[in-house]
Amino acid sequence: LRNLRECDHLVDRILHCVAEPFEVAPGHPVTLTASIGVRTVPPDDADPDTLLRQADQAMYAAKQEGRGRAHRFDPDLDRQVVARRDLIARIRAGLSLGEMCLHFQPIVDLATGEVCFAEALVRWRRADRGMLSPGEWIPAIEGTDAMAELGDWVLEEALAHCARWSAHGLCAGVSVNVSGFELRDPAFAERVRTALARHPGSPPSRLRLEVLESAALTDMALVTRTIEECAAIGVHFSLDDFGTGYSSLAYMKRLPVTTIKIDRSFVADMLTDPGDRAIVTGVVELARVFGRQSVAEGVETQEHVDALRELRCDMGQGYGIAPPMPADEFEAWAKARSPGMPARARG
Ligand code: C2E
Ligand code: MG
Ligand code: MG
């Protein structure tokens, strides 16, 4: 072969030959399809075993793409696949080594100032790399069993903290992010129920679950059923990052969520951008009409608080109120905010 085009031609000819119908017996035509994996050398040479493994891998990719076609092995893609596999393994190890921890960010009632919930935000403390935010590594495990393992751990940990706050006289609830992948598990509500049973100090009304609007909620019927099953045990949902997905209004109308969290991209500029202010105003009104509570994310200044109060947005969360904090700092913060008057979680 002199070039890759020649290779493609050759592979096409093989596929065409194989696809020619032939008769196994008179009047019984049979057609076959083939999937071909191609690995060319050079550029990067490798030992024969590796080359065969890579060709095999390309063949599986061809099958996945719909059979009857060829796929050429891509060394860059392979490096990415290997890197992702390593990261997933490292995350799993991190979980069992106790490297994950939760930070909590207050969600407050904008009218009364009381602390309604604390959003649990996972952090990964790696000895070699310091504290990693979820955006740096959660995407790698989305859609894998490691996501479910992390989700279980986060839920347990969040409920344990919530029960502890409660025992210390602080009645704030806890709001936990769940991925679209976790939510598609038909046993999800059961997992939540089991976790709650292990933490009787943390009643269901104190737990809220956040699902990203941009999460591929492909099976609306299944997701709706899961949300309803959770509601039946007293656990309600928030639609997170509202306004960033493809079908915001359809979700708002059809998903039986209790709370709408307005994405911080709209809130951030609402003081200077009339368009963003109009969106925030509209979403707050829409939430009210649909009987949902509204939460503004990314409340960065006191001016945001004042403007949102004026719009009668129910709750706010953001650096202007408080940043995410370790659990004990959150507890101290919440107590100092309303001395002698325990905050009440809204259900
Ligand atoms: P999110 O659920 O929308 O969480 C809010 C994010 O906005 C947090 O980033 C928080 O630190 C940040 N934030 C809070 N206030 C402000 C503000 O005033 N201004 C700005 N610019 N940002 C603010 P974080 O902790 O990096 O989390 C990023 C995302 O990772 C979360 O977005 C959530 O989707 C995901 N995530 C976090 N923890 C978990 C988890 O336990 N499970 C799952 N599935 N996802 C998680
Ligand atoms: Mg969230
Ligand atoms: Mg959000």
Image (cartoon, helix red, strand yellow):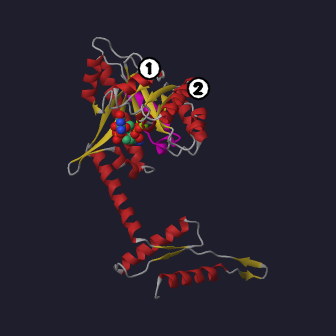
Q: Are marks 1 and 2 in contact (CB under 8 Å)?
A: no
Residue 314 is situated, as x and y percent measured from the top left of the image, at 46, 22
Question: Visible in this render: residue 203?
Answer: no
| Three-letter residue code for mark 2 | Phe
Give the distance between the C-alpha atoms of the residues marked 1 and 2, in whole angstroms: 18 Å
Residue under circle 2?
290
Q: Quadrant of residue 224?
A: top right
Query: Which residue is at the far right?
Result: 27
Lateral position of residue 3 relative to residue 170, left or right: right
Q: Quadrant of residue 337?
A: top left
Query: Which residue is at the far top?
Result: 340
> Which range is magenta?
177-200
Instruction: State yes or no: residue 266 in magenta.
Output: no
Q: Quadrant of residue 51?
A: bottom left
| Mark 2 secondary-structure assignment | loop
| Residue visible at 45% across and 42% down in the picture | 179
| Three-letter residue code for mark 1 | Arg
Where 222 sits versus 107, above or below?
A: below
Q: Depth check: 2 or 120 in front? A: 2
Whichever of labels 1 and 2 marks the residue nearer the N terminus, that label is 2
Lateral position of residue 281 relative to residue 119, left or right: right
Secondary structure predominantly adopted by residues drawn in magenta: helix
Q: Depth check: 73 or 29 in front? A: 73
Residue 343 is situated, as x and y percent measured from the top left of the image, at 35, 17
| Residue visible at 58% across and 80% down in the picture | 12
Where 48 sits versus 318, above or below?
A: below
Question: Visible in this render: residue 306?
Answer: yes
Residue under circle 1?
346
Disc sitting over residue 114 in the figure: none
